[in-house]
Image: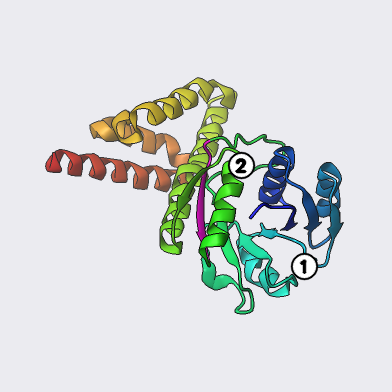
Amino acid sequence: MILNNISFAGAGRVAGALCMEFYRSGIRINKIVSESGINARQLAGMCKASWSTELIFTDSTDLIIVAVPDNRLEETLRKIECGEDTLVAHTAGSYGLDVFPAGMKKTGILYPLQTFSKGRNILFRDLPFFIEASDTDSADILRNLAESIGGKVHFADAGRRKMLHLAGVFACNFVNHMLTAGNEIAVRAGFSPEVLNPLILETVSKAMEKGAAVSQTGPAVRNDLNTIEKHLELLSFSPELQGMYREITQSIVTHYKNQLRNG
């Protein structure tokens, strides 16, 4: 099936990035819907689409991509009105096909494993997309769509996608929180957080090239108790950071002790 037009339910960060990438690749964007209409109108203006606050789509719509926050997904899907031959796909990593209303015949998941922020241009070439669908034709449509923008397609059921979503929390959200803590401590020392940038860049680059586990350095991997105790004393200004340091340090120590034991 060749996609003549696709529509979006949602106009936030994920919807915006996907919508503009599909539009630039030559796919017609038909309609964009958002709750207030503000984001939908702005996004529609950039891709020559119509916009609305109503989740009503014409029978000629080939595909509706539902990209809304997880806590609004079920409600949004229930409100969608579309033709019975329209494929409806959501982008959530933590939900499966069972979230769709029983009346929807063609359903699927198009989950991009990436973090999206306004004002950031995402490189879609080789970006992993994890796909599942109610039928073979729908799976092919989603695969072709992702590949049309350079995506790297993997088929994965809900259980595997949920684990990947969890992996993403550790690899992205928790990392950002650690960087936030590092920035705060650098400022407390009287320096701009930018002094950490070369260290951050080398850490990420080395982890990607060699693997994070073999790239680990620092007092915890050496089980340097003297340095660890000094760090805990320095963190006396923040019981929260002190507790975080203690928990993560112990986790690193245990991980590498087990690695030596099993090696």
Horizontal side, residue 124 vs residue 247: left or right: right
- Main SS of the magenta part reads strand
Q: Which image quarter holds the N terminus?
A: bottom right
- Point out the residue furthest to the bottom here: 102
N-terminal-most mark, 2 or 1: 1
**Within 10 Å of the Cα at label 2, are there few (<14), some (14-19), or many (20+) other Cα atoms?**
some
Amino acid of disc 2: Ser
Residue occupying the point 44% across, 56% down? 156
Instruction: Pick the residue in front: 172 or 133.
Output: 133
Q: Position of residue 136 (x, y in %)?
A: 51, 62
Position above or below: 10 against 253: below
**Quadrant where the image shows the C terminus:** top left
Q: Which disc number belongs to residue 189?
A: none
- Where residue 213 appears, as percent x and y from the top left, is 31, 35
Q: Is residue 149 left or right of residue 32?
A: left
Along the viewing direction, whichever of 193 and 225 lies nearer the viewer = 193
* Whole-percent x, y for residue 66 in the image: 67, 60
- Residue at image position (58%, 46%) is 146
Q: Quadrant of residue 101?
A: bottom right
Whether the magenta-drawn stretch holds residue 4 is answered as: no
Q: Secondary structure at mark 1?
A: loop
Read off the residue under disc 2: 148
**Residue shown at the point (44%, 61%) measured from the top left:** 157
Q: Badge 1 is on which residue?
A: 59
Residue 122 seen in render: yes
Q: Is residue 130 magenta?
A: yes
State the extent of the magenta-drawn residues as a range.
126-133
Amino acid identity at mark 1: Asp
